Every structure is written in C-alpha cells, then in structure tokens.
Amino acid sequence: MVDTSERRVLDRKSENTGFFWHWALPGSRYEFEVLPERLHNSIQDQQERSEILISLIQLLIVFIFALLYAIAPKTFSQEADFAPVPWVLTAYFVFSLVRLGLAINRKLPDWMLYLSAFVDIALLLGLIWSFHLQYEQPASFYLKAPTLLYLFIFIGIRALHFDPRFVIATGVCAAIGWLLMVAYVLFNDPADNMITNDYVEYMTSNSILVGAEFDKVVSILMVTGVLALALHRARILLVESVIEGSAVRDLSRFVPQEVAQQVIHSEEGAITGKGEVRECTILFTDIEGFTSISETLPPEKLINALNHYFSLIAAPIHKHGGVISQFQGDAVLATFNVPKPDQNHASHAVRAAIEIQSVLDREELGDGVVFKTRIGINTGSVVAGLVGSGERVGYTVHGDNVNLAARLEHMNKKYGTRIIVSEYTLAKIPEGIYAFSEIGEVPVRGLNQPIRIYTVRSDA
C-alpha cells in the first residue's frame, strides 16, 4: 500500500524496487504513481538536456552584460585603481563555463543546481551592488538600476528544467538578496538613511522609498509562485507525455504503430467492433518445411533463428510502406495501404517480396540454419480493425482476399515457385516494372471462378 499521507518526489528512488515515485496534485491521474526506471530516465534525460540550454542562456547574459558595459559611458574617475564590474563579469563567465561543462557531461546533481541558483543571484546582485562604487554614488544609487530585471530572467530560465523546486529556490534567493541589498543601504549610514515618502523625490534623487522596494520583493515572490505553480502543472503534463509516448512504443510492438497512435488519440480508446473497408494488397509468407526444421533444432536455437528471420523479412516490408498485422507461428501477414495509406500498394508489396527473397538467399540465420519462404500476394477489399473481447484485443484484417493471399502462398509448393501474385494485384501494377511470368488459370478453394496467377523473378 502507498502511504497517501506523504508526498514523494519523482527523483526519489525506492531502494528495493528500482522504481520512482511521481508527485502530483491530490486527485490527479498520476497521484502517487510508481514510475518505472526507464520512464524516470527519459524524464531525467529531458531535464539534463535543458540544463545545457540554461547554461548557454547564462553565457548569453554574460555577453550582454559585457557589451552594455563596454558601450556605456564611464562616469567614474579614470584614476580609480579598481573597477569591480569587469571582475564580477569575469567570475560569472568562468562559473557559467564550468556549469556548461558539467551539464554537457551530465554531472549536475541537485545540490549543484541549488548552488548554481544561489551563485547566479549572488553574482548578479554583486554586480548591481558594485554600481555605487563604480560610479562613485551613494549606496542607494544601485536600488534604481534596471539590471534588477535580470533577476526575473534567472528565475524564468529555471523553468526549462521542469522542476518547480529550482524556480522556488532561485526566487527565494532573489527576494532575500534584494532585502539584504535594501538593508545595506538603510544601515550603511544610520545618520542619513535617505528615506523619503515623496515619490517625486524618490524618482529624481538617490532617496529611498521603502514601499517601492517592498513592491519589488513582492513582485519577485509573486512571479516565482505563479511560475512554480504553472511549472508544476506542466510537469504533470510532461510525465503524462512520457508515459503515453512509452505506451505508444510498447503498444506498437503488438499492433501496427499507426493503430497504436489511433488508440492513444481516440476518444473511445481501444474498442472492438469499429472496422473499415479498404482496398489493400495482402502479402502472406510462410517458411518452407518449417515443421521438419523445428524437429531438428533445439528450442533456443529455433527461437533465435525464427526471430532473426522475422527481423530480416520485416525490414523490406516496412521499407516499402507495409505493415505487419499478424505473426501466426512461422507465417507473417502484412498489408499495404491498410492502416497506412499507400497509392502504389500493389507495386510496393511485390518489391518487398522480391527483396525478402533476395535477403534470405544471402543470409544465414545462425549456425548454418537457412530458411526458405514462400509468398502469396493478392489485392482487394478487406475489413480492418480491432477484434477481441473483454480486456484483450488485437488488430487484424479479414475477408476473402486475405484468405486468397494465404492460398496463393501455399500454391508455391505445387508449382515450385517462391512468389505467386494474383491477377488482381498484377492489374494494379504499371507494365514493365517487374518481369512477371504467367503460371496459368487455376481454381481456388472458396472461389466460384478460377483466377489467373503469376510469378516474378527474385532478381527483377
């Protein structure tokens, strides 16, 4: 049982299970969900790549600071021995380079990210603090520096990590830091703290308006809070996206990827009884003499050879736009134009068959194992959709044209061929593309009229 009195963070790993707790709003879909490590790693990879982007933005900020400093008129004494701004910019540049190197090498632990947030704010506030020395003005001078706005940039870029903790840490550091900056001004010279209640005087002199500084701190905290809340909600969407993306990849191992995408984005989900009728080309393959081969091979060797065989024939099918709908023992049922649209489905199916035979002719399936396959190809209307009952469904195609492709595959044994194509498929292919040879007009079980069948050379 999961203790719902606690809130667990995604990055906290269970020592025993290797799973990760995901924290979400109460009542949400993923509250207290245990995420597999592979999903956690996917999210963490996104966050680590975001840290590279954050480091690059920091370097850009350093460049902007340096450019503004270079072109701005210098009002301080030319005889001054110390100019603090270049030193602060140099320190921040070095720190940003180190941070970028760690981000590229994926060596940024959480404590380093918190430290980075603190250093970002400390260096920026140090730069602002140095203005009154650089320009030989009272300390209150720096409170009016527009460079304060960069605090919001530093808070904002933390959102790229998709973790509100670092946004909050940066915002709190910024608020506390600015309060310390104000306190320094107020207590630097107790005899003359320069406080005023006159807004005009505040705007036209180095006087301090406490309410204005309070507004700045409130603005920093409000922006931090709103951004953290929005980021928390966005993080839930990120987790959902990773989970659904993983579901699509896993589901596509059992049904065609196009069907998996339809299920994921469908309002009804994976329901049966909703099929579509569409013309397609069916390619049916079966291994020649598989029963005899299976009796002579150890089970592990047979499974390894069979999996290798499936990977070999799947490549040409996918290459030419086909979709494997079913694995039936050693047989494979593939369709072209269903569920993936393809105007040249007949031609592509024949090309895939030719390449399947070509690759099997030159490939051994381990320890001298050789599989020869027979292929039947037919074109016509089929019914495609999810079938099953209860909690278990599968995607398949049905109809007489599917049965005909299977029977054409079996006819290869009678005629000593490796590929048989029906006249319906041939009619869909432009002349001259392949070297077809007519076998003849043959009766087919289940059909009232005989059909004309053809074979095609494997080197066509």
Image (spheres, rainbow, N blue to C red):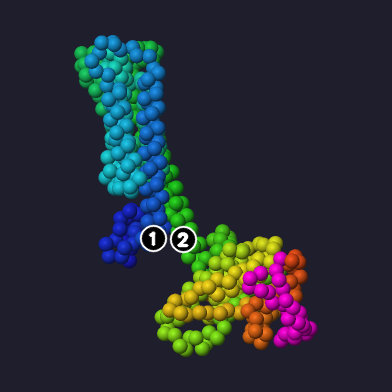
Q: Is residue 251 visible?
A: yes
What residue type is disc 1 on?
Arg
Instruction: Tell whether position 448 is magenta.
Output: yes
Q: Is residue 396 visible?
A: no
Q: Residue at x 61, y 66 (%)?
A: 322
The numbered mark at residue 373 is none
Camera-nearest residue between 294 and 191: 294
Gap between marks 1 and 2, in whole Å? 9 Å
The crowd level at tag 1 (other Cα within 10 Å; few <14, some 14-19, many 20+) is few
Camera-nearest residue between 425 and 144: 425
Q: Residue at x 37, y 52 (%)?
A: 44
- The image position of residue 398, as x and y in percent, is 65, 76
Q: Residue at x 62, y 68 (%)?
A: 352
- The image position of residue 200, as x and y in percent, is 39, 13
122 in relation to 394, above or below? above
The quadrant the C terminus occupies is bottom right
Q: Residue at x 76, y 70 (%)?
A: 427
Could you say whether the residue bearing mark 1 is in a helix, strand or loop? helix
263 in relation to 192, above or below? below
Camera-nearest residue between 210 and 119: 119
- The image position of residue 378, as x and y in percent, is 69, 74
Q: In this figure, which residue is indicated by the disc labeled 1?
A: 38
Q: In this figure, which residue is indicated by the disc labeled 2?
A: 246
Instruction: Tell whether position 83 is magenta.
Output: no
Identify the magenta region. 433-460
| Left or right relative to 400: residue 322 | left
What residue type is disc 2 on?
Ser
Q: Quadrant of residue 383?
A: bottom right
Could you say whether the residue bearing mark 2 is in a helix, strand or loop? helix
Mark toward the start of the polypeptide (1 vs 2): 1
- The image position of residue 143, as x and y in percent, is 33, 21
